[in-house]
Image (spheres, rainbow, N blue to C red):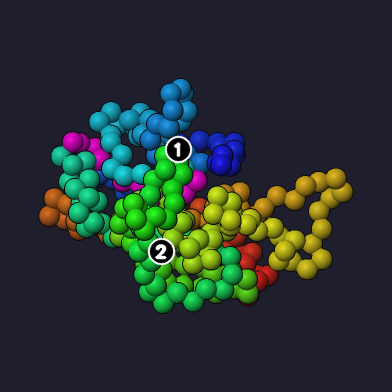
């Protein structure tokens, strides 16, 4: 299935930086910008933006194009290797926030269904041939028809959080690939109408997943970063708090 096509006004790289020192840059990646080169051509991605800012920059990990949030960028090969090893050894604590359809009470729920990568950005649950995948889920806020969930992936498989939630009949809002439905203001607000001949747009034009926090240690130093919600994610939460509480 094609990803949502949305026109993106690319921000200045400097405006995305949450933290920078001699070795590391931490950014709050906007949605709809890929972490790395996806195909040949001139498409803007975080790696290209980072290299324009610092020639030796390397992306240490990737998050889905539609996912917003924390992305670590090394400024030198030694730091890139140290962070990469920390990810490989599962020494990086990753916390994502997702808004899902329905009321779901997850109290440190562990989902460890194996994931098989079928290629072309398609994955499936396959107990026989899939690779180990483990995610923990905790509900942190409830609305009448939706739940805000903290997701902590231990492994880093493609679409891991998205497909693990879908197996719990708890698809992420707007994640049409896994049967998640977009949210419209007319669903939430009584008497809401749009102008004649106009088509109502969803409150959030992507799936509601944000890389919220990272904890790790490199070079004998411990780091903890937290990325604020982007405007679309916070707008959806505000509308839910106002009309769906």
State left or right for residue 236 relative to residue 76. Answer: right
Foreground residue, 163 or 66? 163
Callout 1 crowding tier (Cα within 10 Å): few <14, some 14–19, many ≥20? few
Q: Which mark is residue 48?
A: none
Q: Which mark is residue 151?
A: 2
Residue 77 location, quadrant: top left
Is residue 55 inside the magenta stretch? no
Outermost residue, top side:
41
Q: Is 31 above or below relative to 203?
A: above
Q: What span is in magenta?
A: 66-77
Is residue 73 inside the magenta stretch? yes
Q: How many marks?
A: 2
State left or right for residue 138 relative to residue 84. Answer: right
Quarter of the image with the C terminus in it: bottom right
The percent coordinates of residue 144 (x first, y second) are 63, 74
Quarter of the image with the N terminus in it: top right
Residue beneath the point at 24% across and 37% down: 75
Callout 2 crowding tier (Cα within 10 Å): few <14, some 14–19, many ≥20? many
Q: Earlier in the sequence, mark 1 or mark 2?
A: 1
Task: Tell me, yes or no, if residue 118 can be seen here.
Answer: yes
Q: Which mark is residue 120?
A: 1
Residue beneath the point at 64% across and 64% down: 239
Q: Nearer the viewer, mark 1 or mark 2?
A: 1
Outermost residue, right side:
196
Q: Is 167 above or below relative to 66?
A: below
């Amino acid at each position: 299935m094609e990803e949502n096509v949305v026109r993106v006004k690319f921000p200045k790289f400097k405006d995305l930086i949450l933290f920078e020192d001699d070795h590391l840059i931490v950014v709050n990646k906007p949605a709809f910008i890929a972490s790395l080169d996806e195909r040949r051509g001139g498409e803007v991605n975080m790696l290209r933006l980072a290299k324009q800012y610092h020639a030796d920059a390397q992306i240490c990990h990737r998050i889905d194009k539609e996912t917003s949030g924390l992305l670590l960028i090394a400024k030198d090969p030694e730091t890139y290797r140290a962070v990469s090893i920390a990810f490989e050894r599962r020494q990086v604590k990753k916390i994502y926030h997702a808004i899902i359809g329905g009321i779901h009470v997850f109290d440190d729920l562990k989902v460890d269904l194996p994931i098989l990568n079928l290629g072309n950005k398609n994955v499936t649950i396959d107990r026989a041939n899939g690779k180990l995948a483990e995610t923990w889920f905790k509900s942190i806020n409830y609305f009448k028809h939706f739940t805000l969930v903290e997701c902590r992936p231990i492994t880093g498989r493609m679409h891991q959080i998205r497909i693990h939630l879908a197996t719990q009949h708890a698809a992420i809002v707007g994640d049409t690939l896994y049967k998640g439905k977009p949210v419209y203001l007319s669903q939430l607000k009584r008497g809401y109408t749009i102008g004649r001949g106009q088509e109502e747009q969803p409150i959030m034009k992507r799936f509601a997943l944000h890389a919220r926090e990272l904890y790790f240690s490199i070079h004998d130093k411990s780091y903890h970063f937290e990325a604020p919600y982007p405007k679309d994610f916070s707008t959806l939460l505000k509308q839910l708090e106002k009309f769906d509480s």
